[in-house]
Structures are given as C-alpha cells and as structure tokens.
Image: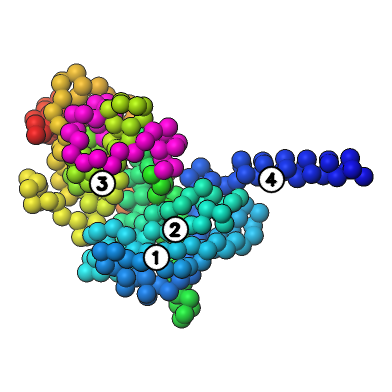
Amino acid sequence: MKNKLSIICCIALFYYSALSQNSLLLFNEGGKIDIEIIAATEQIFSDRGKNPSFHKAKLIFTNQWGARTVIPVEVKTRGIFRKNPENCSIPPLLLKFDTQKTNFSPFEGINRLKLVAPCYNSDTYRNVLLKEYLCYLLYNAITDSSYSVRLIELKLRDKYTGDYQTIPAFFIEPDEVLAKRLGGIKIERRNIHPNACSRIAYNRMAIFQYMIGHTDWSIKALHNIALLELEPSAPPVPIPYDFDFSGFVDAPYALPAEHMPIKSVKERHFNGFCRTTEEYNKAFQYFINQRDTILSTIQTFTYLPEQETKKLVKYINAFYNDVTKPNRRLSKIILKCRTE
C-alpha cells in the first residue's frame, strides 16, 4: 500500500512539475487569444488623472484544457497621450496580478502587464491598433532585443450593467520578463548619450525607426525607448516601443513634433546620430538581408484588410528604395543624421 502511495505521489509530483514547466506562457505562443475583463469599466475609464487608482476586476480566459478560468486582477488607466479622454475614448490599461493566483496559467510569474487597446471602437482604430502590433512583430524579426507582444480579442464587460464591447488589443512583455529573457538589467537613468549605447544595436534601431517612419523617440529622455544592459558595464541596448505616431501606423491623431522638418508622419525623417560610412553600410546591408523576412511578416499577418496590407508593403518598399540606392542613402539618411 505504501509503495502504491509513493508511486502515486511521484506521478503527481512529476505531473505538476511538467505542468509548471510546460504551461502556456503568454509570450511563447503565437496567434490570438480571447480574454474577457469584467470590471466597473465606466469608473476605470473616468479615472484618468495623474495618479489613477487600481480597480478590482476579473480576467477570464480558456485554459489549454478548454476550461473557463477566472483570475482576480486590478486594473487602472496608464499612458499619456492616449490616456487623455480628449484623444481616446478607450485608454491603455495596466493589469496587476496576485502572483500566488496565476500558477499554471499564461500569466504565471507576471506581476504587472500593459494592455494596448484601440483609441475608439471603430474599423479605423482597430486597424491602427493592429498596425502598431505589427510594428512590434517587425522589430522582433530584426532582433531578439525587442518587446514580445501577444494579440488578444478583448471583451470589456461592465460588471454593473452587463454592457460590453469586443475589440482587438495586445499585451506587451513586462520589463522584468524582457530583462530575464535577455539576461540583462533595465536602466532607468536619463540623459545617457546615444553614442554611449551599443553602436550596432543603436544603428539598427535608428534605421528601423526610419523604416516605419517614426520620429517620436529619444534615448536621452527615455521617450518610447527602454535601455537594457546585457552585461555588467556594457553599453546599453536601446529597445523601442509605442509606435502609434509612425507613418507605418498612420493614426488619425498622429502629427510630427514641431521641430521636425516634416509635415506628416508619413514622411520619413532620419532621427539617428551620425556614423561612419562603414557602420552605415553594415546597417543598411543588414536590413537588405532581412527584406524578405520583413515583407513576409507583413504579408502573412492575416488580421488586416488586404487593402491595408498592400499599403504597408508599398510603404516598406519605399524604404528599401532609399537604402538600396547610394544617392538616396546619402540624401535621405546619411546627410540627415544628428550630431547633437
């Protein structure tokens, strides 16, 4: 009898150990997942001051065995531009988990999780959201030193009225998960000069930003940029995020900063620092080598209308027209580089 109990216990321990190791980790799987959040949505959406409070909610999903699973969470609004009710009716959200209640779930080990939602529940803004998500996938194709994302079909239900809306949205990999995955430490210090960063990583990041027509970023101000030190005292690696002001996304509200010499975000302007000809050529060649992968990432992204996909392919091909022709490289990028 004791032997049988021992065998049963060993099997159970093995099972739960395997389950813990092989549980569906949120950013290790592709495809879209269905998530429902039940909360006082009107109360949360109206709490958009400088220091919004967390509000209790329930997060519901279907686990890998097909069972409906409920996890208690807390939710609050976050961000700057999109948190402003004059700019967006649906703000970005921050979810806080009790890590003791997320075991064997996709959210295991996650304390806080950023959720990006469309500004408005309309076709235009759904496409804006999907194109921003696609920017993350494109940077994932460029480098592993990038934020992982997970697309979700989000049902937001008000717990008092029962009213709900279903929208596309996505989760962004938390900083601590990113740092652990890459074996680094996130740097919170501002005023680090771009030339103090890893030059190869910086060059690729700056050209990627040019590729998607994005100028709304700054290393020194840590604006839409995270810095990760992958080894002690090594030059930090810049990791971009928040691409909604890019020409690739082309959000209706997006305008270039006043100091930029462009009138529309659809116009490309190189915002990177000057480099040697050899460094530029290596960076250009890296993107030329990645051309098929980048275009395939766009063309196989099935969630956008075909017309939108064609526009995005055309926009990226215009970038390759710049980097593959020496005269355009010179006039569009090299001579536009920053010296301060």
Residue of label 2? 96
In the rendered image, is residue 129 in sight?
yes
Residue drawn at x 33%, y 32% is 229
| Label located before the other in sequence (4 or 3) | 4
Q: Give yes or no for contact between labels 4 and 3 (Cβ–Cβ under 8 Å).
A: no
On residue 54, which mark appears? Answer: 1
| Label located before the other in sequence (3 or 1) | 1
User: For residue 273, which quarter of the picture?
Assistant: top left
Q: Which residues are magenta?
A: 176-205
Q: Give yes or no for contact between labels 2 and 4 (Cβ–Cβ under 8 Å).
A: no
Crowding around mark 2 (Cα neighbors within 10 Å: few <14, some 14 to 19, many 20+) is many
Position of residue 74 measured from the top left corner of the image (x, y, whole percent): 45, 63
Tag 3 secondary structure? loop
Amino acid found under the numbered disc labelled 2:
Lys
Residue drawn at x 52%, y 63% is 72
Q: Residue furthest bottom?
A: 161
Give the label, 4 or 3, closer to the camera.
Answer: 4
Q: Residue furthest right?
A: 1
| Image quadrant containing the N terminus | top right
3D distance between C-alphas at marks 3 and 1: 24 Å
| Image quadrant containing the C terminus | top left
Q: How many marks?
A: 4
